[in-house]
Amino acid sequence: MRVAIFGTGYVGLVTGTCLTEVGHRVAGVDLDRAKVDRRNGGVIRTPG
């Protein structure tokens, strides 16, 4: 299944990751260009 997720914050990112792990194709969309660039850069680090 092809899925689009609007918003790649904590919920959208985790949801998209889980969906890809079970075989779905996922596209994440976000208005925050800096956030998109960080996601496309590879490793995601979250303090805490």
Image (cartoon, grey):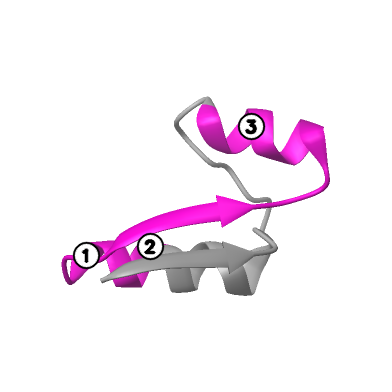
**Residue 30, percent across and down?**
73, 51
Q: What amino acid is found at the position of numbered circle 1 in the picture? A: Glu
The answer to whether residue 27 is magenta is: yes
Direction from residue 24 to residue 26 in the image, left or right: right
Residue 38 is tagged as 3
- Label 1, on which residue? 21
Mark 3 or mark 2: name the one nearer the start of the chain.
2
The residue lying toward the viewer, choosing from 28 and 48, is 28
Dot 1 alpha-carbon crowd within 10 angstroms: few under 14, some 14 to 19, many 20 or more: few
- Label 2, on which residue? 17
> Which residues, given as a range, are shown in magenta?
17-40
**Distance of label 1 from label 2 (alpha carbons):** 6 Å
Mark 1 or mark 3: name the one nearer the start of the chain.
1
Q: What amino acid is found at the position of numbered circle 2 in the picture? A: Thr
Which residue appears at 22% of the width and 64% of the height? Answer: 21
The residue lying toward the viewer, choosing from 46 and 22, is 22
**Distance of label 1 from label 3 (alpha carbons):** 20 Å
Q: Secondary structure at mark 1?
A: helix
Which residue appears at 46% of the width and 34% of the height? Answer: 43
Direction from residue 25 to residue 22 in the image, left or right: left
**Residue 48, percent across and down?**
66, 59
Q: What amino acid is found at the position of numbered circle 3 in the picture? A: Arg
Q: Is residue 11 above or below residue 27?
A: below
**Distance of label 3 from label 2 (alpha carbons):** 15 Å
